[in-house]
Image: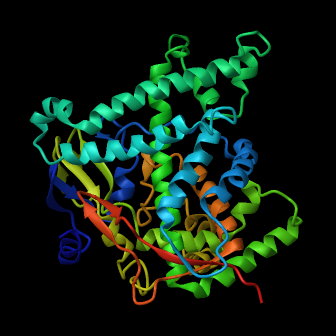
Amino acid sequence: MLLEAYEKFPGQVFQIWTSEGPEIIIPPAFIDELKSLPDTVLSATAGMVEVISTGKVLPGMIEELDFVFPQQFESYPDWTPIEPHSKFTPLISSLTARVFIGPTLCRLPSWLQTIESYSKDVFIASSILKIFPPFSRSVLKNLIPQIWNIRRHNRAAAKIVEEAVKDALNQNGEESESDFENSKYTTHSIWELLPNDLKRDYDFQGRGQLGLAAASIHTTSRLLTHVVYSLAQYPEYAPILRKEIEEIKSGVGDDAEWTVETLGRLKKLDSFMKETMRMYAEGVTSFRRKVLTPITLSNGLILPPGSYISTPLCAISISPEIYPSPTAFDGLRFFNLRNTPSKTNSSSSINTNRHQLTSITSTSLAFGIGKHACPGRFFAAVEAKLVLVSVLERYEFMLKDGEGRPGEVVFNSLKVLKRGGVVVVRDLRRV
């Protein structure tokens, strides 16, 4: 329906009906004039504060990846079917836990189970509630088992975060609070930002940790899964990506650990990931906002208060006006665009910055746009690249004989991976 309307009303504002009621769909031409409006005019859920210094936490993440990778990915001498999403989810859970609560508690099965289950329960509960009219949800929420689970997850998280904070503060006095404030783990960084009355509110901190984990784990796992699907569907790109990895490693020394800077030099891998996101975006729409006061667009159209707006992410992503051959997968599409001089600026750095995986523009909206664009996208990109380097160096992939790429189902405005999606993997055989 959204694609049909986007083609029927090119460049125009139109309205569709969603489970939440009518929603005004905004084309790319108006995004720039809306994205910077204050929350008192056009409101979004407050963005998470970026508290993760990726450069500081990367060494620990690498250490954890070395520990957990063999637990999820084995040696596959012969072609073997695997479900990549079921492997990436616990792997990313472990890496995220290492960053969020540190090395002492990150391997606790109770924490890993809590953060994995929490986001699933949140998704299911919200999906169920959206079936019913808004006025009934305050009552119905108490009848949904997943809501009961969420409350249980909150209690479990509070206990674990309390243990993490007390462990770092060291009740024996060996570590001061000033030392704690300089800690490289996110639990500690969040603690530093809190006012004094919340520094011992472990329930509040636990819910915050669950929110961070839920936002990062399944989004990153989904991206990794789709990238592996793309590697299986388009195996001709794997040698190109491996060569780039080898060139970067040889330039800094094969034994050198990856850094944010060297991962950033994997431009072809970055392009392959971004093209995968373009073709298989997580959402049908993006930039969802509620209008609080009347807004007059540059074409004179007035957005009334109380209305909801969004932009058609899936339609923009395959628009021929934006992307040549939009339905064809081109893993180096954005690599080539980054190396094409800008038509509007003599400096090629404009294109270099514009077409990165984490870049956000009015036509690249997978991470949102404006003040409430996803603040964790830089961390997610580094984490995903780190995992993909390990995958590409070890394995090759293909689709099962006679089967296409595993599909998705659309639920409300989200795309959900179908369960049981399989690719075939084998240990990399170098010639």
Q: Relative to 252, does residue 153 appear above or below in the rendering? A: above
Q: Can the viewer see residue 297?
A: no
The residue located at (62%, 64%) in the rendering is: 73
The residue located at (62%, 21%) in the rendering is: 165
The chosen color scheme is: rainbow
How far from the left and from the top, in percent, is residue 5? Answer: 18, 72
How far from the left and from the top, in percent, is residue 137? Answer: 15, 35
Q: Can the viewer see residue 85?
A: yes
Which of these two is toward me, 427 or 179? 427
Which of these two is toward me, 201 or 320? 201
How far from the left and from the top, in percent, is residue 365? Answer: 42, 61
Q: Relative to 169, does residue 278 appear above or below in the rendering? A: below
Q: Relative to 166, does residue 47 appear above or below in the rendering? A: below
Left/right placement of residue 115 relative to residue 147 reads: right
Picture quarter with the C terminus: bottom right
Q: Relative to 303, does residue 239 appear above or below in the rendering? A: below
Picture quarter with the N terminus: bottom left
Snapshot quadrant of residue 310: bottom left
How far from the left and from the top, in percent, is residue 96? Answer: 58, 45
The residue located at (15%, 60%) in the rendering is: 15
Q: How many marks?
A: 0
The residue located at (40%, 46%) in the rendering is: 36
Left/right placement of residue 145 relative to residue 428 reads: left
Left/right placement of residue 218 relative to residue 136 reads: right
Which of these two is toward me, 393 or 57? 393
Left/right placement of residue 415 relative to residue 324 reads: left
